[in-house]
Amino acid sequence: MTNTVMTRVVRREMHSPRTVVTVVVLGLVVIAAVYAGVEIVLHLVGAAPLLVAPGAALAWVAELPAAEPRAAVIAGAVAVAIVGLVLLWFAVTPGRRPKHALGVTGHAVIVDNGVIASAVAERVRRELDVPKGAVVVGIGHRTADVTVRPEPGQVVDRARVRSIAGEELNGYAPEPRLKVRARVLPSAGRDEAS
Amino acid sequence: MNATNRGTNRAILLLTGLILLAAGACTVLASAWPVAAQAWEAWAGGAVSWMQDADESSRLSDATTVSWLTIGVLAVLLVIAVGAVAVIARLGGGRSSVVICEESGEGAQGAVVIRQGFASDAITHSLASRGEILTSRVSASRVRGEDVLHVSVTPRQNTSPVDVAETVARLVDNLARLTGRETPTLVSIHSGVRARLAADQPRVN
């Protein structure tokens, strides 16, 4: 029982609930509905419209294809379609948060990618004995990019970097698993010399 | 972690997205393609004149300009507005103030309720003494009828998440031993501005 509950909790933590976008959309819907209602009531009591009377608005929509300037109408329509596409994108994509679940301890553990990155960088930095800031780690959904810029005169083996980072990540048992991509840049001194 | 219905959120976004996309695409089509423009004007003109007819034929009485059609439109607008507000109001929630709730058993044992504040104080105070953890927050929520404890911590940069997770897990296990009941626990470890600005942990080797 607990297991299904925790799976659900972890899944919900790892994905965005799309709350902000939904609240914005619903807020605009409420404003539009209230505004349309106000215009209709104003029309019924015979008062002057706030912006446009309901009948005139309908007629404008009916004659939209012939409206001038044509370019402005098309640009507006394209903008509306793009907003629609963006909303569809928000509705359909998984909305993954930059986090990983770790298979350590008996409890459910979720870690920001930034925490994993800084811990891996620190481990690689200590093992290779390079100065602070010489190791840059980027954690993606399935990959870990490790970039090392050694001191002048220091030789760093790419395979070694990969094995250190891989060993550290194995200890985390991240879900989904992270594949290490290591890169060793030419040392900083060479750029200045050349 | 809250009880927001994510399916509803996505359904709303899907629906509005489709409507806007369709409206935009139809307008572009009608503006750029004469055949579509004719179809639009014929259809829209028909719809507008139908509405005028319906408006005139469904007047409440001869004396007013109020018709059942306008009342119907107003009712639909009201339903949309109220529905949208209701969905917004239902977002979030699901927090619970109880971590463990034990029914009174046989004999001398009475009902036991452990409030979230107790678990929260116990865990945050224990974590406060640890140098590598900058902030911690504990909340409880109810998921599918089970109380779940959520411990979220922000460690200093360069701290191994495994060490942090084990520290927190030990505290939670101690709490479980004390209360005699295991609460499902989610440990979330965050990075953030606070973690980036704080100094690295002093190394004593």
Image (tube, grey):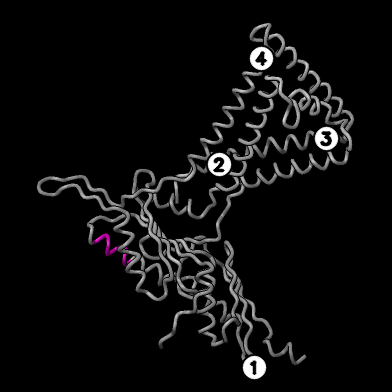
Q: Quadrant of residue B204?
A: bottom left
Q: Earlier in the sequence, mark 4 or mark 3?
A: 3
Q: Tag 3: residue type?
A: Leu
Residue ID for mark 4: B66
Q: Position of residue B19 (x, y in %)?
A: 69, 35
Residue ID for mark 2: B9
Element type where label 4 sits in the image: loop
Compared to residue A122, the image places residue B167 above or below, namely above
- The residue range painted magenta reads B170-177
What's the chain of the residue with tag 1? A
Residue ID for mark 3: B29
Q: Tag 1: residue type?
A: Gly
Element type where label 2 sits in the image: helix
* Front label number (2 vs 1): 2
Q: Give yes or no for residue A24 being in the magenta stretch.
A: no
Query: Which residue is at the front of the view, B149 or A63?
Result: A63
* Front label number (3 vs 1): 3
* Front label number (4 vs 3): 4
Element type where label 3 sits in the image: helix
Q: CA distance from mark 2 to mark 4?
A: 36 Å
For the residues bearing labels 4 and 3, Cβ distance under 8 angstroms:
no
Q: Earlier in the sequence, mark 2 or mark 4?
A: 2
Q: Position of residue B129 (x, y in %)?
A: 34, 73
Please determine if labels 4 and 3 lie on a single subunit: yes
What's the chain of the residue with tag 3? B
The tag on residue A153 is 1
What's the chain of the residue with tag 4? B
Q: Position of residue A120 (x, y in %)?
A: 52, 75
Q: Residues within 10 Å of mark 1 (few under 14, many from 20)?
A: few
